[in-house]
Amino acid sequence: MADDVQAEGPDELTWLHPGQRAAPPEALRRIQVLCGSRPDLFAAMFLVLATHQELPRDMLAAAIKQFRSDLDAYSRDDVVSLLTAIWNGGRSGFDAVLRTRANSPKKGGGGFSWVKE
């Protein structure tokens, strides 16, 4: 049955089928396209994670950091944590981890003018 589905799909989408492994240069090219096609960081990271599940998250983190300038301030470990949060907690998990990182954008002092950050 699975072979029937795979045989009927268009050739250009066979890389999305479970168990398909891309050569590193091909995976990197796809990750670059996915990162560039979505301005929203969460959406880009979610697409990369969903379409490259066979790759270890630390490798995905390194690849994503190459193509997303909005991750320049974050370490590879921070990006791995974001990928894990996306996988386990969706958007709310991603936002929670992003808020806890040392380089995350800081909000104001909560309306207290005497609070300095």
Image (cartoon, rainbow, N blue to C red):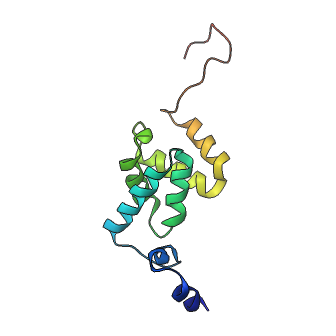
Vertical comparison of 105 with 38: above or below: above
Any part of residue 85 in sight: yes
- Residue 37 lies, with reference to residue 74, above or below; the image says below
Q: State left or right for residue 53 relative to residue 58.
A: right
Identified at 46% across, 56% down, the residue is: 34
- Judging depth in this view, the residue of 86 and 9 nearest the camera is 9
Image quadrant for the N terminus? bottom right
Q: Which residue occupies 55% across, 26% down?
A: 106
- Is residue 83 visible in the rendered image? The answer is no
Looking at the picture, does residue 115 appear above or below residue 14?
A: above
Q: In this view, does 61 lie above or below 109?
A: below
Q: Where is residue 32 in the image (x, y as percent from the top left)?
A: 39, 55
Identify the residue at horizontal 41%, vertical 45% (top origin).
68
Quarter occupied by the C terminus: top right
- Residue visible at 38% across and 66% down in the picture: 27
Q: Is 31 or 62 nearer to us in this picture? A: 31
Relative image position of residue 41 (x, y in whole percent)? 52, 45
Residue at the left extreme of this rendering: 25
Left or right position of 93 against 21? right
